[in-house]
Image (cartoon, grey):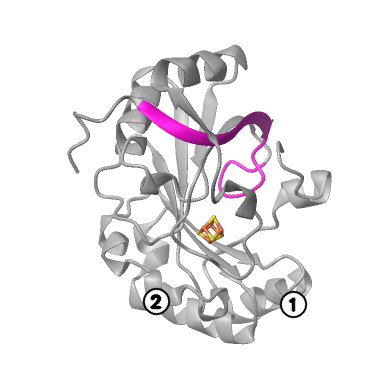
């Protein structure tokens, strides 16, 4: 997508410093940049406050705030960050500035233009998310070992579906990590853990750390 003519700015819901709550770098101090807006409406969404509002920031103002945290790791999240075309050049600029960058994306947007230095954490939406029909499966062929795929699992039906997709797209070979996460308050974590062990699945079970430490309050 051409972004050269766009003003170098993004609409932002929040910027904060916290511990990475999930994925490969769980527990690592990280600066989070939450972009405003998302075209999806997953039933379990815990960031509905990012759907609208927000404030426009120039890239320079954003970088100034990020640098002030004196933390080398940045996670760009949402909402759906890729819904704003300027996310692509912003990710590149973060990499150029030497930050270690990850991107959390809902799996409905094309990831091909994302800088390859970025670790892309791509959701595949399960049947019980209510947004399965939005999955862009072309993204699966673009994944590398630097990337991660995430399934938020609400039920046994979701688990079986995720297991099928794992096999269908050979995700354990393609991506660096395949993450299975129980939907908070919908599926008992222990149940999911036991299914994974019983089936000898080559995936990484994860709990969302921030929900246990900070009860998912905004700003963490
Ligand atoms: S993609 Fe993420 S931000 Fe968008 S509705 Fe789903 S869970 Fe919420």
**In the depicted view, which residue is nearer to us: 179 or 18?**
18
Name the image quarter holding residue 207. bottom right
Residue 111 disc label: none
Residue stretch in magenta: 9-26
Q: Is residue 126 left or right of residue 84?
A: right
Residue 22, magenta (yes or no): yes
> Residue 3: x percent and y percent?
22, 34
Image quadrant containing the N terminus: top left
Q: Residues within 10 Å of mark 1 (few under 14, many from 20)?
A: few
* Mark with earlier residue (2, 1): 2
Which quadrant would the C terminus be assigned to in this image?
top right
- For the point 52% across and 76% down, the residue is 130
Q: Determine contact: label 2, label 1, CB under 8 Å.
A: no
Residue at the (33%, 24%) spot, across then down: 8
In the displayed structure, would residue 194 be above or below residue 209? below
* Residue denoted by label 1: 191
Q: Which residue is mark 2?
A: 133
Vertical placement of residue 133 versus 179, above or below:
below
Label 1 sits on a secondary structure element that is: helix
Residue 56: x %, y % from top left: 47, 29
Left or right: where 77 falls relative to 133 = right
Cα distance between the residues tagged 2 and 1: 26 Å
Q: Nearer the viewer, residue 65 or 53?
A: 53
Residue 21 falls inside the magenta stretch: yes
Residue 146 in view, yes or no: no
Report how many numbered discs are placed on residues in the image. 2
């Amino acid at each position: 997508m051409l972004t050269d003519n766009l003003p170098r700015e993004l609409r932002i819901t929040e910027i904060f410093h916290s511990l990475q709550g999930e994925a490969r770098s769980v527990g690592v101090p990280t600066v989070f940049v939450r972009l405003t807006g998302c075209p999806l409406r997953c039933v379990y969404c815990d960031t509905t406050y990012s759907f609208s509002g927000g404030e426009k920031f120039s890239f320079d103002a954003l970088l100034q705030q990020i640098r002030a945290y004196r933390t080398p790791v940045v996670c760009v999240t949402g909402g759906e960050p890729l819904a704003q075309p300027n996310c692509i050049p912003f990710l590149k600029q973060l990499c150029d500035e030497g930050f270690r960058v990850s991107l959390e994306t809902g799996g409905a947007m094309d990831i091909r233009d994302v800088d390859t230095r970025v670790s892309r954490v791509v959701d595949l939406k399960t049947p019980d998310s209510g947004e399965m029909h939005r999955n862009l499966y072309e993204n699966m062929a673009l994944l590398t070992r630097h990337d991660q795929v995430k399934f938020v699992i609400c039920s046994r039906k979701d688990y079986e579906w995720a297991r099928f997709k794992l096999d269908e797209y050979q995700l354990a070979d393609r991506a660096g990590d395949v993450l299975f996460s129980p939907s908070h308050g919908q599926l008992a974590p222990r149940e999911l853990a036991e299914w994974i062990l019983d089936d000898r699945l080559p995936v990484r079970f994860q709990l969302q750390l921030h929900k246990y430490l900070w009860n998912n309050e905004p700003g963490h």
